[in-house]
Image: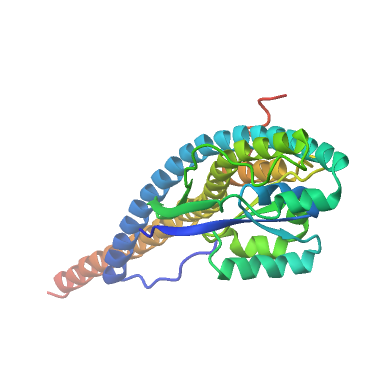
């Protein structure tokens, strides 16, 4: 490991000790943050997987139904039936700060009941089924969007934090330790040198008399 | 805390997105990668909060997706198209788990 270049002085020693203290504290905080994020991440990612499976199954069913409907009706008729939505779907969004992360909160504005956007005159029952199924999936889709976004940002942040924790634990703190040790040894050595020199001069003075 | 009304968009091939139109999503019929990416940028600028992309598009529009990945909104979410799920989205979840935890703990349970 590359060693830090430091001057062996007392001032440097105090500074380094202070820095080390900060690093250790930062390391502990980061580690706690990482652990908490991993815990949350596991919860969210489980939910994410569950939702994703459900959505894929349900959406697949709706799409299949829709394919059948298209087969029975002419393309123009289908497009005409679906061209104008009964009501626009809106979401309310919000952000929440959790562990210095911005987490989205997405909520579908509740719509009671369900209207078909078309009359029943020219459409087939398969189309009704497909639209119905799709509207049932929509709340799940929105929740999926929220959970998946949270998972994405958590995963990113966990990776970053882990790097920081490791950098502190395996690079910064050992470097500080090493530098502190070095300075201490140098200072001690100087001390010992001083003492011997004093002893020597004292002896020489005693001999001269 | 900002409460804003926002809308949801869906981009994909015609067969897959028509259905979404009936329930009131903003629907864009697009299969070309470049145009879809431009559309994503435009929607993001206009304040669209959730964009659903069909899986084939999600697999190709990586540039736009990576750009918005680190931002809170819009959330770009893959959904299966009319041909069913291709596994892109699941692979995405798996990649997330591996990135965050280092090992795949979620999918190994199933086996």
The answer to whether residue B102 is visible is no
Q: Position of residue B12 (x, y in %)?
A: 75, 55
Please tell me which residue is depicted at 40% across the width and 62% down the height of the picture.
A179
In the rendered image, the quadrant that contains the C terminus of chain B is top right
Q: Can residue B40 be seen in this view?
A: yes
The relative height of residue B81 versus residue A58 in the rendered view (above or below) is below
Q: Which of A195 and A59 is in front in this view?
A: A59
From the top left corner, tell me how far across and down residue A163 is, in percent. 53, 54
Give the vertical position of A86 relative to A13 (above or below).
above
Left or right: A94 with respect to B64? left
Quadrant of the image occupied by residue B94: top right
User: In the image, is A103 to the left or to the right of B78?
Assistant: left
Nearest the eye: B109 or B47: B47
Q: Where is residue A170 in the image (x, y as percent from the top left)?
A: 50, 52
Nearer the observer, B93 or B30: B30
Q: How many labels does the image show?
A: 0
Residue at x-position 42% and y-position 54%? A94
Picture quadrant of residue A184: bottom left
| Identity of the residue furthest to the left in this view | A209
Residue B105 in the image: state x and y as whole percent: 62, 32
């Amino acid at each position: 490991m590359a060693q830090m270049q430091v001057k062996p002085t007392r001032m440097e020693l105090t500074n380094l000790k202070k820095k080390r203290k900060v690093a250790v504290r930062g390391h502990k905080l980061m580690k706690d943050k990482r652990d908490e994020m991993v815990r949350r991440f596991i919860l969210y990612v489980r939910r994410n997987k569950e939702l994703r499976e459900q959505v894929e199954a349900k959406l697949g069913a709706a799409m299949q139904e829709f394919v059948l409907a298209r087969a029975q009706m002419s393309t123009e008729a289908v497009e005409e039936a679906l061209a104008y939505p009964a009501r626009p779907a809106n979401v309310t969004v919000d952000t929440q700060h959790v562990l210095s992360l911005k987490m989205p909160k997405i909520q579908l504005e509740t719509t009671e009941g369900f209207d078909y956007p078309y009359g029943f005159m020219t459409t087939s029952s398969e189309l009704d089924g497909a639209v119905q199924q799709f509207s049932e999936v929509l709340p799940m889709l929105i929740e999926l969007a929220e959970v998946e976004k949270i998972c994405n940002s958590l995963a990113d942040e966990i990776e970053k934090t882990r790097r920081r924790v490791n950098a502190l634990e395996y690079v910064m703190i050992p470097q500080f330790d090493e530098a502190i040790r070095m300075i201490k040894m140098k200072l001690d050595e100087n001390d010992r040198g001083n003492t011997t020199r004093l002893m020597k001069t004292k002896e020489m003075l005693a001999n001269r008399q | 805390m900002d409460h804003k009304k926002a809308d949801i968009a869906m981009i994909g091939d015609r067969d897959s997105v028509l259905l979404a139109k009936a329930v009131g999503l903003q629907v864009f019929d697009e299969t070309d990668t470049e145009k879809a990416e431009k559309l994503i940028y435009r929607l993001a600028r206009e304040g669209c909060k959730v964009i659903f992309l069909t899986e084939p598009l999600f697999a190709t529009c990586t540039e736009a997706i990576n750009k918005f990945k680190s931002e809170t909104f819009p959330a770009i979410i893959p959904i299966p198209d009319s041909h069913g799920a291709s596994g892109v989205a699941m692979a995405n979840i798996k990649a997330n788990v591996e990135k965050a935890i280092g090992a795949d703990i979620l999918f190994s349970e199933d086996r």
